[in-house]
Image (tube, rainbow, N blue to C red):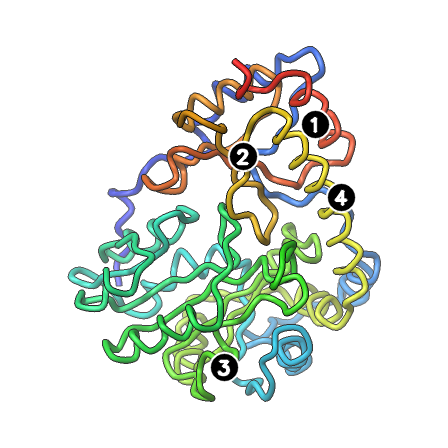
Amino acid sequence: MGLQTGALPEFPWDTLKPLAAIARAHPGGIVDLSVGTPVDPTPAVVRDALAAAADSPGYPTTHGTPALRQAVVDWFARRRGVPGLDPAAVLPTVGSKELVALLPSLLGLGAGDVVVHPRTAYPTYDVGARLAGATPLPADDVAAWADSPARLVWLNSPGNPDGTVRSVDQLREVVDAARTTGAVVASDECYAELAWEEPWATAGVPSLLDPRVTGGDLTGLLAVYSLSKQSNLAGYRAAFVAGDPVLIARLVETRKHAGMIVPGPVQAAMTVALGDDAHVAVQREVYRARRDLLRAALGAANLAVDGSQAGLYLWARPVGAPQDSWSMVADLAALGILVAPGAFYGAAAAGHVRLALTAPDERIAEAAARLTGGGPGRR
């Protein structure tokens, strides 16, 4: 495999710097809602586990400790409706972004291969295909890729940036089609514990590994998850992938050679975090309050919210006449509010902006006050 770095676009968030400067110049200061980086404290129970494991002179295991892999298995059964997962089919990763970016290369994809990803999507799916020398294909409908040389199909449910959730039936349709063509299906599910609307708030967000989706067969299927969002562990780079034992074994061997290992103390902290649902519930309510306040303010500013059934973002557009996403970013920057343009997430997203819920309560309240005082939709 070869990394094709020459064809990569400029890192999207670097292009926001001029508008960030405008927002920063606001008399009340900037409210930065452009990146979904957690700002609330890492739970004490997790920090204590990290500290207790700090004496870590030896190399950690690439495959993860037995305790961590069992914690993942137990979490899938308890929280995701996936019982009986094989602990051998679990692999910790250094955050989920590195796996998203490198999975096509780790699977040996290259020129002539197609990597499918959602039309409105986090840019790293596209970048990962390009790094491997493969061809990215934005597509939401199975018919768009069923006859293509697709080797990897990315799903993202709940979606970033738009917060859409795929049902069991929708997931099963993708799995059935991929098994006909021989493609691997990888599902990025890192927002699954943050469901806001029904039926997902009560029933839970379905996983790709759900037996109702797989029919009890995990062949060709990988589910990716991160503790960054649910547990405020972005700084720990704590994530994992699970699913097909054969694929996981291949990934483990490659990562052994490359030295791609989650640090031992982080593995210990992950084990504790996965076993403690209480801190996740507390953090969910913090985000719920921010979401309710910001969503109401967007409505008052004549901005509609689409999708956003789950996750850490509100996916907004003006009511009435469409507006280019960069123009919306500029309007909001004039209010001192920095958001991400839909243009970052593909051509299909150019009429929206993404607002993150990951700012302190005081800053979310400040954004709401500025929006209700006259937002961009009231020009």
Q: Quadrant of the N terminus?
A: bottom left
Disc sitting over residue 378 in the figure = none
The residue tagged 1 is 368
Instruction: Give, as a three-letter code, the residue at label 1.
Output: Ala
Disc sitting over residue 212 in the figure = 3
**124 relative to 362, above or below:** below
Q: Mark 4 or 2, which is nearer the eye?
A: 2
The answer to whether the residue labelled 3 contacts the one labelled 4, judged by CB atoms less than 8 Å apart, is no
**Counting residues from the N terminus, which is met first, the one under dot 1 or under dot 3?**
3
Secondary structure under tag 3 reads helix
State left or right for residue 328 relative to residue 105. Answer: right
- How far is disc 1 from disc 4 in space, using C-alphas? 12 Å
**Image coords of residue 300 (percent x, y):** 64, 26
The residue tagged 4 is 289
Q: Mark 3 or 2, which is nearer the eye?
A: 2
Secondary structure under tag 2 reads strand
**Counting residues from the N terminus, which is met first, the one under dot 1 or under dot 2?**
2
- How far is disc 3 from disc 2 in space, using C-alphas? 34 Å
Q: Which residue is depicted at the point 57% across and 52% down?
A: 309
Q: Which residue is depicted at the point 54% across and 34% down?
A: 304
